[in-house]
Amino acid sequence: MSERLTLKDLPALKAGAYLLTGGWLWSRSGFELRNLLIKNKKITAATLPGFNPENLPEVDVSGSYLLPGFLDVHTHGAVGVDVNAADAEGLRKIGRFFASQGVTGWLCSILTDTREQTLSCIRSAREVIEGGFYQGAPLLGIHLEGPCLACAYKGAMPENLLMTKPDLGFFEECQKAAGGHIKYITIAPEIAGVEALIPKLTALGMTVAMGHSGAGYDQAAAAVKAGVASATHLGNACRLFHQHDPAIWGVALESDIYVEAICDGRHLHPGSVRLYLKAKGWDKVVAVTDSIMAAGLPDGNYKLGVNDVVVKEGDAKLKDGTRAGSTLTLAQALRNLVKFTGRPLEKVVPLVSTNAANLMGWPDKGSLGAGSAADITVMDDQLQVKGTLAGGQVIYLAGRG
């Protein structure tokens, strides 16, 4: 007789392999009642209920949805911690909160800052990335949002620190300090020299996105041809569509690149989200939070890099009224997307997991197939997170933190 357990027993489980049983397993075509066989931090098989020839311990998740772990590639903080001011323990605190929201991997987004502070942020991130397992969502890399961005579309970026001429040496210094962990970078195509910079950033191991930009159509199209793979929070802090010059917005929707979407109902009208999906298809839209340190906390006064931010009714803004990040979580984004689109859960799930994995080139993430990392978000029928697994280990359990 196999050992029968629940998720709360999993941390104490000594076996190197186990079955998740009784859960509704996600696939693009729908949900099926399946067991997941977990071995050596990987999913090795999805089996029919009752099939356990190896007599492995069975961890009962009956009635739950089993979803590929959520991935947030654009966030500036949560629970009182601002990425730009965080030490390693601060980043782990963010990761522990993200685990409670179903996140199994994230990039910390460093807002444009001084060279010294940027390098300090990078060092803290590297410590966490290379530090191994902790009880929270793994930090998978770094996102540099700037400093090569347009002043006219700076949003919450400090204008005096923006780079008006590309400096490859700066980015090489940052990547060296990061130990190669800068995985994502946002640039503005209209800055002279950026088109030539893009392939060099790609060669440094960075996926390049365009944003915080007033680029016209031709400039944005040239950036895509040079290697831009994504558009940062499309529709926010960028020049919008005009029939005589569709600009960065038009290029992003017309081309094959990915687009980020902040799905909080504030940064984008639900109709805009539906338009993105109509234009891009369901495989090219990546839900991001762009969250700040106020995520998970009540209204009040907060920081975003060097900026003072006021959060009122969950809406984060600078004192001049400019929107400054969000208080969104990916679990809420998933619930919002189901509401915004009216489509079934299985259709929406890739926007918070699979699409980000494909954008970033993480082949073992965003899937629940054999060979995938055992990064699993367990949700109830109200789409509340019951538990989160990273590499087959529990990093969050509802009711226990």
Image (cartoon, rainbow, N blue to C red):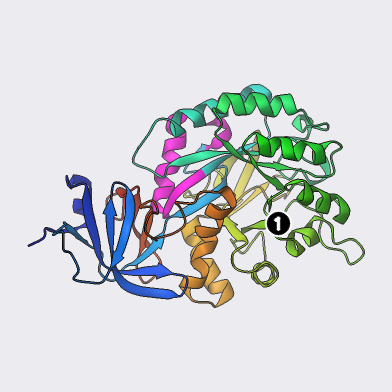
Residue kind at label 1, given as amino acid type: Leu
Residue 91 lies in the magenta-colored region: yes
| Nearer to the camera, 117 or 224 | 224
For residue 390, side relative to residue 163 (left or right) = left
Residue 96 lies in the magenta-colored region: yes
Q: State the image quarter where residue 292 is shown.
A: top right
At x 37%, y 34%, the residue is 132
Disc 1 is placed on an element classified as loop
> What percent of the width, then of the height, locates residue 250?
80, 62
Counting other residues with Cα less than 10 Å from the Cα at mark 1, is it few (<14), some (14-19), or many (20 or more)? many
Q: State the image quarter where residue 64 is shown.
A: bottom left
The stretch in magenta equals: 82-106
For residue 267, side relative to residue 390 (left or right) = right
Residue at the extreme right of the image, as rendered: 244
| Nearer to the camera, 184 or 197 | 197
For the question of whether residue 213 can be seen, the reply is: no
> What percent of the width, then of the height, locates residue 233?
67, 54
At x 62%, y 46%, the residue is 310
| Nearer to the camera, 152 or 61 | 61
Residue at the extreme top of the image, as rendered: 116
For residue 124, side relative to residue 377 (left or right) = right
* Residue identified by numbered label 1: 234
Q: How many marks?
A: 1
> What percent of the width, then of the height, locates residue 206?
63, 39
| Nearer to the camera, 188 or 329 | 188
Dominant secondary structure (helix, strand or loop) of the stretch shown in magenta: helix
> What percent of the width, then of the height, locates residue 117?
62, 25
Q: State the image quarter where residue 197 is shown.
A: top right
For the question of whether residue 223 can be seen, the reply is: yes
Vertical position of residue 385 compared to residue 214: above or below? below
Vertical position of residue 85 compared to residue 253: above or below? above
